[in-house]
Structure formats: structure tokens, C-alpha cells
């Protein structure tokens, strides 16, 4: 019985299946030996690829086929059916591909193919000799990975203030903090990746200044590094509390692996925790601490959690969901002082606590760009190619404000997948591709066993159209303004969420 549980599901595709079992545009899951394989038909072509996303192992068969691509239902990664290449972050590694043969009225999966090179991306002129990346987060890592993926041969220097190599930051407030994911899941790549790809990753490297005219980066220790192209991917930093007692050792923010480790260590000796702020990070922390059987209280100034981003209906749902799991809310309230085992509130009440986590927002780290004289507008201003006002200097991730084709406005988005996709686009544009960044913003948030997916970007709206039932955890909400859908939020409506993203992408490219 135990052996049967490990056998791949579905038909043995090496033995063949009837041709009529696979309609045009349809997917069929099976296996080839011990490998789980997904068959996809597009017109007269049939593709056989790995059945799971290389990001979090999402089931591609539950996703969406669009053209010669397949999209993951969980976090909207996208793969080329012909080559297996990961086209859209958050997946960075390809899926496997197999040869397919049609004989008579049957389809057979044959041998697994050697991983082909990524499709050629035309560039103009000679590639730059030296590329420097400032930042070791999502955008910086994705840029470095893409440069080597397309076989850029020049030098890559990656400067990170962090003491850890690039990590999967969303995990720090979700599974890793909850204790359901081991730490060896957290690094985006092992240390050998950097040395093996000739990426000069320098940890604990603080950049003091950038000189656009000299094309030089100066470190805090006085050393200088020359560049031909520069990517600023400095990210954001948590807003710090300014109330009495905020500097005590049991008070934390969450941004880095070191931060998450400190919270986990504090959680191990805590019975009660207080989360300040009902942000996505704040409430994911609350859910993770509840998974550790810690009593959790949330203090926040708003009337409803998440209402500014998700609207009142979803805000009420999120509050009820957390209350079902034992979280106690103190809304329309803020902390006024933190003592050794107690937090005083502006309402006059006080709460006993052993652990405090502040999730009151982040600020883009634009100081380097500002001091270098780059154009600033509530972030670092970039054009459609992610190039700043200084030629040869690009910006990506939390600091970048770019012209969004869908909304017609310049926007800045603080989300992991956006940062990765911008890092990839900036890498190609630094090599001369001149491809406009037109990806649709996407993020996901996990609260206990409930995933919330968000596609698009809506800073305001005049209507929320609700499909399905929010309370039943089966819904899709469209945030509309003047008859146009700017964003879509969903719970367990994965294919509909993917269709909304594809529709927005087509609108942007039209």
C-alpha cells in the first residue's frame, strides 16, 4: 500500500493513449516512468512537459494554456511548452520536456529531452563588459539569473547589504515563520550557484555613493567598482516604530532572514504576541504565530483590515477568518508605548505580551538614487524600459516607479513577483533588447489554508463586482473604475484569475 502511494497518477503515457482523449487546448496528466508528465495539445502539435511548477510545485494541469504557454494556478508562473523555459517569475527554473510521437490513433511519450537553450533574444550592438547590481533581493537576483541564462559573458557584481545570499522572502512571513518549512527551502539558490555562474556576490557590502558620470560605485569601505550598466534594486525597508520602548529586544520588524530567525527565537519562549499593523505582512505573521500556538492580538488604526487594498467585503472576511483561528483584533487603535511585558494603547487600554512584531509598512530605499541626482517621484522614476534619468542606470523592484500601460499612470508596486519580473526585464534591456516592461502586477497572500491572489493594480475604484461567495471561500472580485477592470482578487478561482491576467496582458500589448 505504501508503495502505491508513491506511484505517479494517471495513465502510463509511454504505453500510449487514444488520440481522441486529448482535445485541442486540453491537458491530460499522466506519467513516463516515475516522472509526472502533462500532455497539452495546441492545434496539430502535442507537447509533453513536467506536470508541476518549479516554484512551489503547483499542479500545472489545474492552470491555463494560452498559446504555446502554460500558466501555474498558484502563483502565476508561466512556461514555454516547446522549450520548458520559465517565462514569468516567480518560477526561475525550467520544466522538463519529452519527445512525443503520434502513431495511428495513439499518442506516445518517448524520451526526456536534454534541456534546450532559452529562445534567442535579439540585442543591439556590443554587450556591456561590466554589470553591477546593487541589491540582493528579488529584483537583483532575478536580473543576475537572467543575464547568465541568456549567456551574457561579461562580469556581474552583485552588492548586497544582507548577511545572507538571496532568499525566498515571501516564505519568511509564511511557512518558514510558521515552522512548516525548513530553512534549507529559503535560499533562492545554493551558494554554488553564484560561483558556478561567475556571479561575484558580495554580502555585507554597503554602497555609499553612485557616480553616473564616472560610471562608478563607491562602497562604504572606500573601494570603487566601475560599471558599464548598473541596476539599482535596493528594495524597501520597514517603517520603524517611534514610540517609547520600540528599541527593546522583544520588538521586531520582518524583512530579512535574520529578522525571521529572531522572531522564531522569540516565539519559542513566548505565550502572547502582539502584531502592530493589519498589513499583509502583519496578518501573515499573525497566522504563522497562531500556527505555533501563541496567543495573538493585532492592533491597527483602520476600521477593517486590508480595506484600502481589498475593499470592505474582503476586509470583513479576513478579519472573520483570523478571528476563527483565535486572533483578537483591536482596530481603530494604535500603540503609544512598549514596556517589558506590556503595550499601552492610545485608547488607554494595555495588553500583556511577550513578543511584538511591527508590520506598519515599508519605505523605498531611494537614498542612493537621490544623492546621485536621478529623477525621483515617490520612488525612482524609470521609463518603459526601466531605465532611470541617467543613461545606462536602471531600477527595478520596490523602488521603481514606471509608466503602467493598463492604468495610464506611473505606479510603484511593492510585491515580490513584480520585482522579479522587473529584474528580468531590466537584465535584457541592459543588454540592448529594448523590450517595454508590460507585465501585469501579481501577488499572493496566504492566511492559514486560504490563498488570496491579486492581479492588476487599483489604487481607487468606483465599483467592486463580486462573483461567487466570499464567505464560502469561492469568489472573484473585480475592482472597476469607469467600467474598466483595474484589478481582480480571488479565492480558489485560479483559472479565472489567470484568465484575467492574460486579458490584461493583451490589453497592454494592443
Image (tube, grey):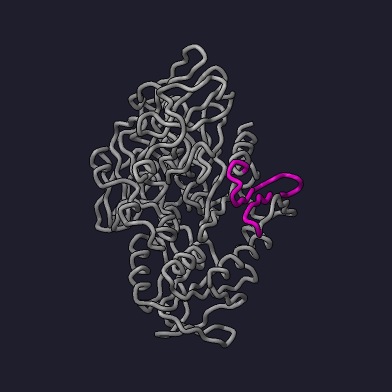
Q: Which residues are magenta?
A: 471-496
Instruction: Report the magenta stretch's main SS.
Output: strand
Q: Residue at x 35, y 22 (%)?
A: 111
Residue 251 is inside the magenta segment: no
Residue 477 is inside the magenta segment: yes
Q: Residue at x 65, y 44 (%)?
A: 408
Number of labels in the image equals: 0
Residue 125 visible in image: yes
Residue 186, given in percent of the width and then of the height, sits at 35, 53
Residue 382, given in percent of the width and then of the height, sits at 51, 44
Classify the position of the N terminus by image quarter. Answer: top left
Looking at the image, which is closer to me, 484 or 218?
484
Query: Which corner quadrant of the image does residue 48 belong to?
Result: top left
Image check: 439 left or right of 160? right
Query: Which corner quadrant of the image does residue 307 belong to?
Result: bottom right
Q: Residue at x 72, y 53 (%)?
A: 464
Q: Residue at x 65, y 35 (%)?
A: 507
User: Among all residues in the image, which is located at the extreme top?
Assistant: 104
User: Among all residues in the image, which is located at the extreme front?
Assistant: 1
Looking at the image, which is closer to me, 483 or 108?
108
Residue 150, given in percent of the width and then of the height, sits at 37, 30
Image check: 63 left or right of 396? right
Amino acid at each position: 500500500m505504501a508503495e502505491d502511494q508513491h506511484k505517479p497518477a494517471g495513465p502510463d503515457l509511454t504505453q500510449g493513449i487514444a488520440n481522441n482523449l486529448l482535445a485541442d487546448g486540453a491537458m491530460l496528466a499522466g506519467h513516463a516512468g516515475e516522472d509526472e508528465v502533462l500532455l497539452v495539445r495546441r492545434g496539430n502539435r502535442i507537447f509533453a512537459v513536467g506536470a508541476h511548477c518549479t516554484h512551489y510545485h503547483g499542479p500545472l494541469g489545474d492552470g491555463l494554456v494560452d498559446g504555446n504557454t502554460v500558466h501555474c494556478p498558484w502563483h502565476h508562473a508561466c512556461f514555454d511548452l516547446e522549450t520548458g523555459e520559465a517565462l514569468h517569475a516567480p518560477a526561475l527554473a525550467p520544466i522538463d520536456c519529452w519527445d512525443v510521437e503520434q502513431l495511428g490513433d495513439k499518442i506516445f511519450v518517448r524520451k526526456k529531452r536534454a534541456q534546450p537553450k532559452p529562445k534567442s533574444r535579439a540585442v543591439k550592438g556590443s554587450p556591456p563588459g561590466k554589470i553591477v547590481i546593487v541589491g540582493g533581493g528579488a529584483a537583483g537576483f532575478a536580473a543576475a539569473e537572467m543575464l547568465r541564462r541568456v549567456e551574457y559573458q561579461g562580469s556581474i557584481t552583485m552588492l548586497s547589504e544582507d548577511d545572507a545570499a538571496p532568499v525566498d522572502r515571501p516564505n519568511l512571513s509564511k511557512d518558514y515563520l510558521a515552522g512548516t518549512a525548513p530553512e534549507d527551502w529559503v535560499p533562492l539558490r545554493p551558494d554554488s550557484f553564484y560561483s558556478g555562474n561567475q556571479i561575484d556576490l558580495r554580502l555585507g557590502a554597503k554602497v555609499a555613493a553612485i557616480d553616473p558620470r564616472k560610471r562608478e560605485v563607491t562602497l562604504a569601505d572606500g573601494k570603487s567598482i566601475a560599471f558599464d550598466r548598473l541596476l539599482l534594486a535596493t528594495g524597501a525597508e520597514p517603517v520603524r516604530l517611534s514610540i517609547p520602548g520600540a528599541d527593546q529586544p522583544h520588538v521586531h520588524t520582518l524583512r530579512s532572514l535574520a529578522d525571521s530567525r529572531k522572531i522564531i527565537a522569540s516565539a519559542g519562549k513566548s505565550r502572547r504576541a502582539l502584531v502592530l499593523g493589519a498589513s499583509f505582512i502583519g496578518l501573515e505573521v499573525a497566522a504563522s504565530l497562531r500556527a505555533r500556538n501563541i496567543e495573538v492580538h493585532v492592533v491597527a488604526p483602520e476600521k477593517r483590515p486590508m480595506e484600502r487594498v481589498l475593499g470592505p467585503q474582503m476586509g470583513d472576511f479576513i478579519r472573520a477568518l483570523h478571528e476563527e483561528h483565535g486572533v483578537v483584533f483591536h482596530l481603530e487603535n494604535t500603540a503609544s508605548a512598549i514596556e517589558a511585558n506590556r503595550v499601552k494603547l492610545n485608547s488607554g487600554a494595555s495588553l500583556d505580551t511577550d513578543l511584538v512584531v511591527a508590520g506598519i509598512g515599508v519605505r523605498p530605499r531611494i537614498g542612493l538614487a537621490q544623492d546621485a541626482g536621478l529623477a525621483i517621484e515617490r520612488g525612482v522614476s524609470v521609463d518603459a524600459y526601466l531605465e532611470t534619468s541617467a543613461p545606462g542606470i536602471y531600477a527595478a523592484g520596490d523602488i521603481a516607479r514606471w509608466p503602467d500601460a493598463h492604468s495610464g499612470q506611473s505606479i510603484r508596486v511593492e510585491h515580490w513577483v513584480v520585482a522579479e519580473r522587473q529584474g528580468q526585464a531590466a537584465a535584457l534591456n541592459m543588454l540592448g533588447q529594448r523590450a517595454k516592461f508590460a507585465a501585469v502586477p501579481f501577488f499572493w497572500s496566504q492566511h492559514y489554508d486560504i490563498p488570496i491572489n491579486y492581479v492588476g493594480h487599483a489604487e481607487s475604484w468606483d465599483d467592486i463586482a463580486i462573483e461567487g461567495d466570499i464567505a464560502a471561500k469561492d469568489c472573484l472580485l473585480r475592482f472597476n473604475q469607469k467600467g474598466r477592470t483595474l484589478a481582480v482578487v480571488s479565492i480558489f478561482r485560479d483559472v479565472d484569475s489567470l484568465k484575467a491576467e492574460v486579458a490584461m496582458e493583451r490589453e497592454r500589448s494592443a
